Image (cartoon, rainbow, N blue to C red):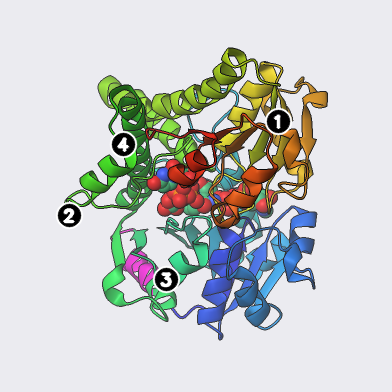
Amino acid sequence: MKINNICCIGAGYVGGPTMAIIAQKNPKIKVHVVDMNVNKIAAWNSENLENLPVYEPGLSKVVKEARGKNLFFSTDVNKHIDEAEMIFISVNTPTKISGEGKGYAADLKYVESCAKQIAEISKSNKIIVEKSTVPVRTSEKIKQILKSYNSDVDFQILSNPEFLAEGTAMRDLEIPDRVLIGGDNTKEGKKAIDSLVEIYSSWVPMNNILTTNLWSSELSKLTANAFLAQRISSINSLSELCEATGADIEEVAKAIGMDSRIGKSFLKTSVGFGGSCFQKDILNLVYIARSLGLKKVAEYWEQILIINKHQRDRFSKKIIDYIKENKLEPKVLILGWAFKKNTNDTRESAAIYVANNLINNNISIQIYDPKVKEEQIISDLSNLNPDYEKSLVNFIHEPFSNISDYNIITILTEWDEFINYDWEKVYSGIKKPAYIFDGRNILNVELIKKNGFNYIGLGRK
Ligand code: NAD
Ligand code: UGA
């Protein structure tokens, strides 16, 4: 079946960029991205492309090209469900905060409410595409909901998880390692798979489009994230071992990564991984394993999160201990708040946890991030601790405006502008003794030491 009209429910970090690319590459298909968040849709429709709700290099160019031609953003969810032949569900699937599975299981209430709404509105056959990351066998649940609310039309369910990483989303969408499509092994199921393959094949080589059954597709997405996060926790655990032994983590990572069986990506030590997915997806995997009685499997994967928290905490403790031991003024300049560079997303950013640890130790912080808004930072801190001491938190818009005020700087996001600063000039403004805590290992250690400052990184001296 040839698709002419797509609706995507959820105009977030996945829905927005993914649909922009699908629309750009398939000019004959009308793509409507809908969301119940009125402000978000207004921002997607904003004349000023700087105001798009998602900051992602290259995104505004694609939106500019397709918006108003065959790409539309709307709050009229019902209308576009009704008109679409294919509907992507791209809503959030956060960790449950109450009820059974609280703190571990994925909360599927948004996915389920989409399924119910689709069933209630639909008057013609539709292909429903699970784009959100969900527990294995969720499509079964979606099928049940659709059937129980509407038995008059035929719904085919596909799983098409998204593998883009924020900060590189446009490149990842443009040249994906693979596009994964899971569907039923029936005549109708295969037809539905073909319809989606056809859409992707307008720019993705067929060899990179992998089709599987529904459950394999769902489980592959969760576990791909678990494998990626596992590498970061592995290298982060080694950074502590390096500190205890005098080995250098940068050298160790290079040496390990040069083994072609291991590979060099995702071996960059950091103050801990953040982002909206690694933690929630691993918690979900742990929950699934535990629910199936696989206690050891659950414990194995949970350890990745334990190391991640440990890395954030031990980095914060380094700062706190240095302040105490050296009787320094308890005041820290925080450079970077986003969970990684080239995104305005702060969900689960290590910066939130480090800042909270500092505040709890009565240390005042000044925060600078090139893309994150002040309101977002305040909301992140309050979500973690509603009673945080507000007087300890300040914001600056020029990172080194009052540089002579600081003797402690910490880098928590690896923004290029931090790497590219004229650090010689920066140091000349800092009152000594100054301590640079590099949570991303991006600075030139020799340069810092040459200028007479103390460098505290992760696993390197
Ligand atoms: P997001 O929070 O940025 O966006 C989700 C959007 O869905 C929100 O704008 C919300 O208002 C909207 N929404 C929720 N319920 C709705 C409903 N019933 N009707 C209309 N709109 C509704 O989330 P995201 O980061 O885009 O992630 C979406 C899914 O994709 C998640 O399952 C996530 O795990 C997965 N994923 C995310 C990434 C990523 O990098 N962020 C990458 C791959 C997969
Ligand atoms: C991750 C995956 O990379 C995507 O494939 C996946 O689609 C996505 O999760 C998802 O399901 O949401 P994302 O979280 O956007 O993407 O960003 P990553 O590049 O994976 O970085 C995650 C965190 O790990 C960041 O805080 C980053 O700084 C950290 N990281 C990454 C390291 O500390 N070291 C590394 O070597 C790599």
Residue identifier under label 4: 248
Query: How far across and how far down the image is residue 175, in percent?
Result: 40, 71
Q: Which callout, 3 or 2, points to the residue nearer the camera? A: 2
User: Which of the two labelled residues, at mark 3 and mark 2, occupies the earlier sequence position?
Assistant: 3
Whether residue 180 is situated above or below residue 412 in the rendered picture? below
- Depth check, mark 2 against mark 1: the one in front is 2
Residue 276, numbered circle: none
Say whether mark 4 is within 8 Å of ligand 2: no
- Residue range (magenta): 184-194
Q: What count of labels does the image hold? A: 4
User: Label 2 belongs to which residue?
Assistant: 260
Q: Position of residue 121 (x, y in %)?
A: 66, 59
Q: Earlier in the sequence, mark 2 or mark 4?
A: 4
Query: Where's residue 401, x and y in %?
Result: 77, 46
Question: Which residue was labeled with disc 3?
Answer: 196
* CA distance for labels 3 and 2: 34 Å
- State which quadrant residue 247 falls in: top left
Give the main secondary structure, helix, strand or loop, of the magenta stretch: helix
Residue 398 seen from this side: yes
Q: How far is the residue under mark 2 from the one under mark 4? A: 21 Å
| Residue at (63, 80) in percent of width and height | 66
Residue, disc 1? 381
Q: Does residue 348 show up magenta in the picture?
A: no
